[in-house]
Image: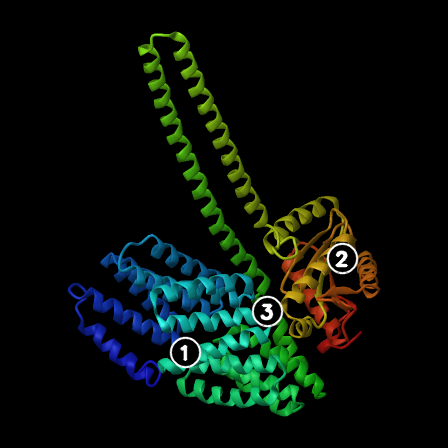
Amino acid sequence: MRRTDPVALLQILDEELAAVDDRTDRLTVAHLHRLRSQTFRDQGDYDSARKDAIAFEEKARALDDLVLRSQAIMLHGTIEAEQNKLTTALDKFHEARRILENSDQGTESDRAGELSMVNTAIGVTHNFAYDFERARHYYEEALRLARVAENEGLVMTALGNLALAVSEIDGPEVGLPMHREALELSQQQGDLHGEALQRALICERLLQVGRLDEARSTCLVALEQVSDLGLTRPLAGTRMTLGRISRERGDLSEAVEFFELALDDAAGVVPGVVLELHKELSEVNQEMGNAEQALHHLRFLVTLRDEARTSERQALIEELEVKYEVEQHERQLELMRLDAQLREVQLRQRTYLLLATAIGLAFACFAALAAWRGYRIKAGLERTLDARNQDLELAVEEIGRLARTDSLTGLLNRRAFDELAADQMARARRSGQPLTIVLADIDQFKELNDGLGHQAGDETLKWISNQISSFLRETDLVCRWGGEEFLYLLDNSDVDAARTAVERLRSHLAGRVCRVKGTSISVTLTYGIAPLDDNLDAAVYEADAAMYEGKRRGRDRMVIAGDIGPAGSET
């Protein structure tokens, strides 16, 4: 009924919850709250879903059922993830994972199955944040645990999600056979939901490898299936893929129709897809010569990007992951310290034994030899333990350093940039020196990723980061702001000085090529420049708008905030 008649199901659940005695049948009440939360979530009523998830957790806690409690926390996490609150969702999923790992309730097979679902959820959250390498790690662990649990349904889910990450990292040709295997498993089990999802994903992979006719026919079947099942997120995604297929085939009017239908499906439910659809509609309308419509969607895109920065989500998620790794290393360090204390007690006991033996020995020379040997063993062990403890402490310090840098490029991350920028702004206020913000975005980066793969995209990002770093002064700041965006803070520089510095960097890049996968490619950036006074967010917003105006004017150029006329016209 969750799929076919959710309204009737909610009415039944309300009646059942009113009739069941919470004091005598707490387990039944817990399961009713869970089902009602899931139904509200499916309908997009996230506030009601969250209330029932919290009630479900309270009942599980009262029952002292750790597995049930982890399920409640994980359900809460899925509600946050669907609203694009990825850091909150990830925190919930890791909490559920920790509970399961420390629980001895249930069988090993049951715990493996629960842990498989939690690892899948963590992987999906990283997938939403475009951290495909980390998502792949969790999907592989989910697949291993699903096989331990001997649960074919979980194997199919984990395999399908792993195919997503593999397609992004190694290319759609590698991921496509895995999607087909997951589709076959779902058909064998009669899992209509899994079958519809995998067919939609196969359609997207076929588009990526250029098999447009096969992609379209597969997508149309998937569209009918996800529509019948009432799956909002896959419905929006499938229509977006059909729009992209139509655009590739040159049927721009049909592409706009699919994109607008997908936008209606995704509005208020799938924020990440809404961003992509506004971008697609802006570009297609521009190709069709509909400048007013193109500008309308571009404005929406800028506003939405300002409200939900992908880079900020990635930085916060990275912080949570590093926090988890630090906890693991600190736990190992504490175990090492306890081990050192135990060895010290054992050495002390051994020393006492040696002294007692010495008293009983008739010859003092034998006693002295035994004591010396015990002392040397103790000293050697203490030196070894000290060295190991120092290594662990250095590792914890290194992890703390990594929490301030972007793992791919080595540039500052958003958190570290904000802290250092605040210091720069304070110094500038005291000295009266000007500061300028520059926001740069790699041109046509999506096409590079689609054409050469995400590994080539990563290599390009690292190359660009090195080029940018070599042109900045020690007092300037630069961070990776988003997927292919970079933000600079130029110290003691007004807008004119920033224009000169950016033009020098732009000209330098224009004369060089980046080699990735044995291919030489030219890489350009579009720059937005804005003065920075006391409000970093406002300056970034102005630079962002200027940078998008530069994209509209043809890319590989810089635009100063304030040089944008009404409705984006050039001035």
Task: Of the two numbered discs 1 and 2 on the same chain, state the one appearing first in sequence.
Answer: 1
| Mark drawn on residue 185 | 1
Q: Is residue 158 above or below residue 500?
A: below
Applied colour scheme: rainbow
Crowd tier of the residue under label 1, counting other residues whose Cα lies within 10 Å: few below 14, some 14–19, many 20 or above: many
User: Residue 2 sits in which quadrant?
Assistant: bottom left
**Secondary structure beneath label 2:** helix
Considering every residue shown, the one lying at the far top of the view is 363
Q: Nearer the viewer, residue 20 or 443?
A: 443
Whole-number angstrom distance, CA of label 3 to CA of label 2? 26 Å
Quadrant of the rendering where the C terminus is positioned = bottom right
Crowd tier of the residue under label 2, counting other residues whose Cα lies within 10 Å: few below 14, some 14–19, many 20 or above: some
Q: How many marks?
A: 3
From the viewer's perspective, tell me whether residue 14 is left or right of residue 410. Answer: left
Give the residue pinned by disc 3.
Answer: 170
Give the residue pinned by disc 2.
Answer: 467
**Image spot of residue 531 (x, y percent):** 73, 58
Q: Is residue 171 above or below residue 95?
A: below
Q: Are marks 1 and 3 in contact (CB under 8 Å)?
A: no
| Residue under the point 49% across and 47% down | 326
Identified by mark 1, the residue type is Leu
